[in-house]
Amino acid sequence: MYVGTPFSVRTGTAWTLSLSHAVLDSSGEFEGAVFAALDESFFSAMLSSMNYAPDMWTGIAHGRGRQFMITPAHEGLAGIDLAKPGSFFTRHMESGNDANIMTGQVLATGDKRIMALQTINPPALKLDWPLVLGTGRRLDAVFALWSRDLRLVLLFYALTVLASVALLYLYQRRIRAQVALNNALSSSLVTERRRLAGILEATNVGTWEWHVKTGQVVFNDRWAGIAGYSLDELQPVSIETWHSLAHPDDLAKSDKMLQQHFSGELDYYDCEARIRHKSGEWVWVLGRGCVMQRDADGSPVIMMGTHIDITDKKNAELRLQASLESLARYNQELEQFASVVSHDLRQPIRTVSGYLELLRAHLGDRLTEDAEKMVVAAERGTQRLDQMLCGLLEYARTGLDDGPKAPIHLLDVITDVRELLNSEFEHSHARIICPPEMGSVTIKACRDDLLRLFMNLISNAIKYRRPDTDPVIELAVSPVDGGWCFTVIDNGVGFDPAQAGRLFNMFQRLHSRADYPGSGIGLALCKKIVERYRGEIHITSSGPGTGARVSFTLYE
């Protein structure tokens, strides 16, 4: 008998199983065939009777894996192909057994089930393909009753254990709580003492505890060590120990601040004073303290505090004060020098220059050629000396008059420089390029410093230009931590990189004065201004004819 693959009569709703059998005569010749079509109703009643629980499924499948029917009906399961790797059907067929009971997951639904599968293939029917009958239940439903009973047993056991533990806990609770409290207090006290001792050792401070009414004082070893003593050497200690070591001038100030603290005018006692060291020298200490206990009348009973050795700090302050006084004297001498340069030293130069003019006017055409050369050389010498003195005067005065520092918009400074050097720009056809971000740069400085700095750098870029090239000066700016970095780039004559270090020295020149006149102090002046603002300045060039690049930083 031939068993055909199930097919759907109405798409997706009903499936039919076809059977066919050849009819042969007594001689074995084919006489015809018998066909039968079985639909789901033929098997429905029989299969439904096998489902004794709501979660049970029963189904029949063709031996090739096509499911013929399933009861109760589930949408999408009738007609599916069960012959997939790992399915119940595949595992049953591969086992070679006619009957199997197995557990696993239904691939089509994801349910975990226990399934009984039976291959239907009666020998008398000589089927070309067997049918496979399968029925099964969900595992969670099968084990639901067992799980409930197990949970009840476990719950009873857990309650019994908890009751026993609770009784034992209540019995020992007070003892454990008391032991834990004692241990916590002891541990906390040890930890606090260790922490306090560590802080005192790490900060290297002396401590004192003053019982104000009795005069009794408790010092630690470090307090005695500040004065050069051991604690044993100071015994017996009291408030008189402090009075005997403190400087008389500072003791009065200390007593005054103590009274202000006792009265409530000061929240804390904070006083710098000197104490006499064992070596005889005076040691500076910073005393800080506070009243920790007062009596019913508000009078201080116990006061605690620290002493810190600040001798090095005070000595540094004294050295700084001496340096400031020395600097003030230096500035005063420099102002006097500037006055001498401006009046006394330049006056003889003006006199010589005046006599040379009178000599030229008096002799006129009677000057011989040699005399004319000597007069011209003398005039140039006086002019050069006057320029050098003017430059020296400007260099000396830079930084003496510390005008008020205020926020300065750098673009305004560049604009002023452009106007002051207008004739140089027009004569040389120079161009200056400012980046857009320059408009937002503001630096707190003296305006005259910035004006002199940028005027010297830009005028140098114009002066040291190549004869056949119009000067182009490019400015750049970028922020640095706490300040600004500026760059001035030109396309001028450049210089030998090995000579860069000389350019910031006074009166140093790399080009002849005939080709490029000047005093030779411009970059030295720029360096002095930059250093006033804690910055650095550098100049670089790739070589003659390649231009120069000046970079410097300014900090507020």
Image (tube, grey):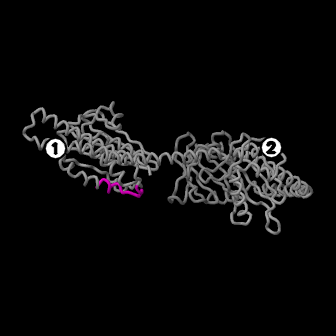
Q: Is residue 422 visible?
A: yes
Compared across the picture, whether 75 is left or right of 457 comes to right
Residue sitting at x 46%, y 47%: 329
Distance of mark 1 from mark 2, alpha carbons? 87 Å
Does dot 2 land on a helix, a strand or a loop? helix
The quarter of the picture where residue 225 lies is top right
Which residue is depicted at the point 50% across and 58% down?
A: 11
Where residue 393 appears, as percent x and y from the top left, is 33, 45
Residue nearer the viewer, 67 or 172 = 172
Amino acid identity at mark 1:
Glu
Q: Which segment is the magenta one?
A: 403-415
- Looking at this view, name the residue that lies furthest to the left: 365
- The tag on residue 231 is 2
Taking depth in this image into account, of 441 and 347 the one nearest to the observer is 347
Q: Position of residue 234 (x, y in %)?
A: 81, 45
What crowding class fits label 2: few (fewer than 14 Cα within 10 Å), some (14-19), or many (20 or more)? some
State left or right for residue 359 relative to residue 339: left
Q: Horizontal and vertical percent for residue 184?
A: 83, 52
Q: Nearer the viewer, residue 224 or 354?
A: 354
Which numbered marker is on residue 357?
1
Q: Of marks 1 and 2, which one's residue comes earlier in the chain?
A: 2
Question: What is the quadrant of residue 158 in the picture?
Answer: bottom right
Asked if residue 413 is positioned above or below residue 384 in the image, the reply reads below
Between 478 and 243, the one nearer to me in the picture: 243
Residue 106 disc label: none
Label 1 with label 2: CB-CB less than 8 Å: no
Tag count: 2
Residue type, numbered disc 2: Leu
